[in-house]
Image (cartoon, rainbow, N blue to C red):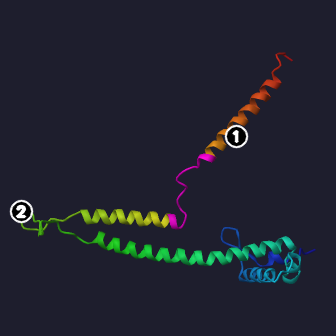
Amino acid sequence: MAHDQQPDEDDRLRDGKGRYTRSIESVRRDAAAAELRSERKSYQQIAEALGYSDKGEAWRGVQRAKADVAREPVTKLIRSEAAQLDDLYVSALEVLERDHVMVSHGRIVKDDDGNPLLDDGPKLAAIRELRTIRESYRKLFGADAPSRVSVDAQQLGAEISALFDRVTDDDGAAGDDGSDG
């Protein structure tokens, strides 16, 4: 006997890593669910009207629609910031790739043969700027691990360890009544 898929599974696709992604149909259905909810429809009514398997799925659809609304401006902002970083990166690369002559008191410094000496300062500054821009990219896209652990988390970890030690000590003491058997 063939197993019928529930409507909620029909519009879910898998990406190349086996994770579910939302189809355009499911995005539209979630948006419609949010619209119905704004009209004071119950989650059960939304589920029945839009083919969700139950009112819990209808609620999740509304939550996804809310996240979609917030996600679009954030995605647009990230794209804008990334474009600005791209422009800065290209400018810094141009400085890095140029030769810069050494200047002292408004005059080009030359070697004994009369050839201008090159100044590495601007190239080093460009390298630092490129590194800073790359750090900004990592922060913008969340690639960096958190740089510090909160004191609360450390304290909680210490309390958990102390409780664990106490429990294991109590277990050892309970089994050790001084008798050999």
Which image quadrant for residue 162? top right
Which label belongs to residue 112? 2
The N terminus, quarter of image:
bottom right
How packed mark 2 is, by other alpha carbons closer than 10 Å (few <14, some 14-19, many 20 or more), is: few
Q: Residue at x 71, y 33 (%)?
A: 165
Viewer-proximal residue among 121 and 69: 69
The C terminus, quarter of image:
top right
Which label belongs to residue 133? none
How packed mark 1 is, by other alpha carbons closer than 10 Å (few <14, some 14-19, many 20 or more), is: few
Q: Position of residue 19 (x, y in %)?
A: 70, 68
Which image quadrant for residue 160? top right
Mark 1 or mark 2: which comes first in sequence? Answer: 2
Q: Residue at x 79, y 29 (%)?
A: 171
Under circle 1, the secondary element is helix
Q: Position of residue 2 (x, y in %)?
A: 90, 75
Distance between the alpha carbons at the discs numbered 1 and 2: 72 Å
Q: Residue furthest top?
A: 179
> What stretch of residues is rendered in magenta?
139-152
- List the residue tagged with mark 1: 160
Q: Position of residue 131 (x, y in %)?
A: 39, 63
**Residue 148 sits inside the magenta stretch:** yes
User: Above or below — where is 14 with respect to 29?
Assistant: above
